[in-house]
Image (tube, rainbow, N blue to C red):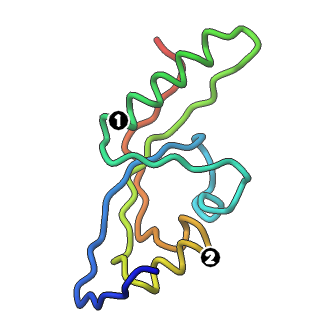
Amino acid sequence: MLEEKSLQNPPSFTFYTYSVAGIPTEDRWRPTGIAEIFFDSLEEARGAVIALRNDITADPDMEWSSTVLEKIETIPLDQEAVLALLNRGPAGIVASCEVVETFGLQA
């Protein structure tokens, strides 16, 4: 079992993820049954979206939907935040979410 440590100033973190464009803010973090994928750098997230778009547009039976790249900032991650993450999913620890780039069809 992990030893509990007291954190007077627990850290916050910045991550990146992507989602289909146009999801209303109030619905963004609702569970959909599709796992969220998070990245620790903007470049890594951008590369993943470009690779996904290339795979989807190469398949004539699939259609690409505009996708947004999002910058996520967490609340300070203390024990209470970890419980929120476990019980409510990513919504439990997201302090802010900002769209940083939109990927439509390739030009």
**Badge 1 amino acid:** Glu
Q: Is residue 60 above or below residue 30?
A: above
Q: Residue furthest left?
A: 9
* Residue occupying the point 39% across, 37% down: 45
**Image position of 104 (left or right of 42):** right
Q: Which residue corresponds to the image point at 45% horizontal and 24% vertical from the top-left? A: 50
> In which quarter of the view is residue 47 placed?
top left
Q: Quadrant of residue 79?
A: bottom left
SS at mark 1 in the image: helix
Residue 87: mark: 2
Extreme front residue here?
1
Residue sitting farthest toward the right = 61
Provide residue 69's location: percent of width, then percent of height: 44, 41
- Picture coordinates of residue 12 (x, y %)? 30, 70
* Residue 36 coordinates in the image, percent (x, y): 57, 50
Residue 44's disc is: 1
**Residue under the point 62% across and 56% down:** 24
Instruction: Please report whichever mark, 1 or 2, sits nearer to the chain's N-terminal start.
Output: 1
Q: Quadrant of residue 44?
A: top left
Amino acid residing under circle 2: Asn
